[in-house]
Image (cartoon, grey):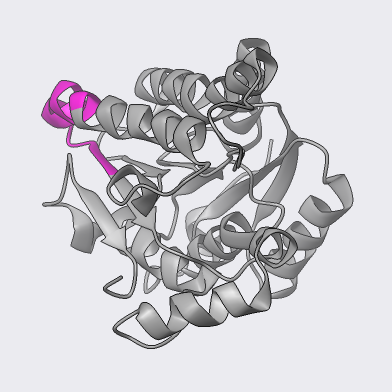
Amino acid sequence: MISISETQIDLKLPLAGKVAIVTGSSRGIGDAIAQRLADDGAAVVVNYVNGKEQAEAVVRSIETKGGKAIAIQADLGNLADIQRLFEQTIGNFGRLDILVNNAGIALSNPVTDATEAEFDRTFAVNAKGPFFAMQAAAKHMQDGGRIISISTILTVVSRPNRAIYAASKAAVEQFSMTLSKELGGRGITVNTVSPGAVETEMMAASMPPQMKQMIAQQTPLGRLGQPQDIADVVAFLASEDGRWLTGQNIQATGGA
């Protein structure tokens, strides 16, 4: 077990003494969120499915800056893995204060071509996983904790080929709103952050440069989002400054 003694806590940091799980945090937005929460003083669990080396690199980066982090493998589409993720977090750090549901599958397929396997896997990771992670968090989390889930602006602005992905994320938004009512009495806030287009490895692999340029031009702030933009919104919601926001869906899109 990794102890967090009072002598090791910098009380000037907004998340000093807190413990956070960030699912799917070996790269992209999840990586940026894990790094930002650690910078703010939280001990962070870097969750991954297959990217062990990437997750360990995130941990090393956090430790190099003086933070605390561990990597835990868990498939968010598997209930046994979710339970193990929370048990190992409590076993290592002794508490849980923040859950960020970031892991997801961004399927892009026309409705006419989608398969049952694609549907089931997307909903397993994007909807069932966050639901049961929220359930586990509700059981293990300290009063005054934070649950933050990453959704997408595609639940508001529909796009071709994104029906299954958007629907799976819309479910998470509904879970969050309901749970905010159930956990409010414990001072636990439950919110969703819905990014627009964010420049990540996943985007680079799936979107041609001309499409990215067009989206940037259509965004009032004149550029694509960066993982750090989303991480900063999450960090605000995780902090004491975000205490009066719950049941909300923050559209972090640069105005798009």
| Magenta region includes residue 49 | no
Compared with 56, 164 (above or below) is above
- The structure residue drawn at horizontal position 41% and vertical position 62%, both measured from the top left corner, is 196
Q: Give left or right: position of 192 versus 60.
A: left
Q: Give left or right: position of 4 versus 206.
A: left
The prevailing secondary structure element of the residues shown in magenta is helix
Q: Nearer the viewer, residue 163 or 99?
A: 163
Q: Give left or right: position of 100 versus 240.
A: right
> In this orientation, does residue 25 appear?
yes
Compared with 80, 219 (above or below) is below
> In this orientation, does residue 224 appear?
no
Q: Nearer the viewer, residue 224 or 47?
A: 224
Q: Which of 32 and 8 is in front in this view?
A: 32
| Magenta region includes residue 185 | yes
Image quarter hosting the N terminus: top right
In the displayed orientation, state which residue is furthest to the right: 53
Image quarter hosting the C terminus: bottom left
- The structure residue drawn at horizontal position 47% and vertical position 18%, both measured from the top left corner, is 132
User: Where residue 39 sits in the image (x, y, percent)?
Assistant: 53, 70
Q: Quadrant of residue 135?
A: top left
User: Where residue 7 sits in the image (x, y, percent)?
Assistant: 52, 62
Q: Give the range drawn in magenta.
A: 178-191
Q: How many marks?
A: 0
